[in-house]
Amino acid sequence: MPDTPAVPRPHAVVLGAGAAGLFATAALTEFADVTVVERDVLPEGPEPRRGVPQARHAHLVWSGGVRALGELLPGLVDDVVGRGGRLVHIMGDMVSRAPNEVWFRRFLATHHRNLVCSRDLLDSVVRDHVLKSGRITLRQGTSALALEGDARRVRGVRVRSGDGEQVLAADLVVDATGRGSRAPRWLADLGLPRVAEREVDAGLTYATRVYRAPGTTADGTFPLVNVQANPARPPGRGGVILPVEGDRWIVTLGGTRGGEPTADPDAFVPFALGLADPVIGELLRDAEPLGDVTVTRSTANRRRYYEKLGRRPDGFVVLGDAVAGYNPVYGHGLTVAAQSALAVRDVLRRTALTAPGTAGALQRAAARPVAGAWDLAVGQDAFYPGAAGTPPTVVERLLARYVDRAVATGARSPRAMGALLDVMSMERPPTRLFSRDMLVPMLFGPKKPHLQGPPLSGAERRAARS
């Protein structure tokens, strides 16, 4: 019998080689050959690049994202840790003041481990793991210009590089180009309705400076230190110390309208000392800065509801910050990107990539982790003056009060803390906050008394000064 000709694999084009784009690429290579289109030229190692300006600020991956990365890219988390990252026990290895001004006890009774490192290191390791696949073609220095196709189906994307313009044919185009995505305009050019959008902007400005880990704190055991802003006392001011690889601290300070930090290096520590608790400023008094202050103002929560489009083309999906960008203070962007990519993979294991309706199924599946992170962020930020066009509803105010009470309970009860972290880490849905593990301690106790100050040990304070 003659040989049966091989059926060609589908071809997908992923726009953007940031975290969301590469996570999506990792998911898609099981089902298609993938071309990654990236406007920048990617660095060889853990170096900053123009297309990810937010990389200079503090980042972490919540345990829900760590779990997703373990499924999507086995060995990646271990590789990050092997190159200097840390799996940090939350709350045992963290000193944190909640938005409602209570200090969390450093309970060790939960399983949650967050991945902590610089964004440059994480991106470098992700590139190493994803781009080594022989099923991937990387097109650097190439910009996406427009979608090719019509209102029923996208068949490719027009790009421009040093060789001029050309069309890359594709069975699926994934837009992971971030907050600056032009997908709404591209879809409108195909004759489709404009996607609904919502923005909640707390007016947060971020300022970050890197320090050499002071004293003897470079041994990899110093806790994260986090003072969160309180929406009920605007302007909201907060900050975080993130010990990372290379014996460094990434220190990010933030303030909302009327209380923003600046790029003035002489004002950085005084701003930290002026937070609701001065612990971050106190730890920085004798620390050596390793560079200037970097300021970012693009921090609004902005969501585009692609999953709700009444008419949508097959062959096109939007992921990552191009769907929803969050106030970075909540640290959910990377976790959402990993979970969304995993959702894409799971759908494609049940449905052919080229089947009618697959793109819509992918968009809806990816929207589930997006919705969870969105509700967590907006539930806080909507209470800042001027954050949204309409004030919070009665229901939103009631829910916010309940969450404040849940946080206060978790600060004193390890059982309630476990339920709270299940939701914050994006391992479980928000309904977990109404489970017995939360309600019983909330209503009946037992609960330890609230701490009166940061749970930083004397030995830890001495280490920062020695």
Image (spheres, grey):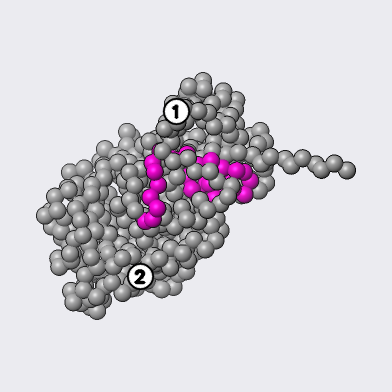
Is residue 378 in view from this perspective? Answer: no
The percent coordinates of residue 300 (x first, y second) are 32, 41
What's the residue at 24%, 75% (across, down)?
216
Which is closer to the viewer, label 2 or label 1?
1
Q: What residue is pinned by disc 1? A: 164
Residue type, mark 1 in image? Gly
Task: Report the magenta residues as a range.
Answer: 21-46
What's the residue at 21%, 73% (across, down)?
215
Image quarter of residue 387: top left
What's the residue at 43%, 46% (across, down)?
18
Q: Left or right: where does residue 266 sit relative to residue 397?
A: left
The percent coordinates of residue 397 (x first, y second) are 36, 46
What's the residue at 38%, 62% (across, down)?
116
Q: Nearer the viewer, residue 257 or 36?
A: 36
Q: Nearer the viewer, residue 246 or 409?
A: 246
Using the image, tell me which numbered label, if any, was put on residue 93: 2
Q: Quadrant of the N terminus?
A: top right
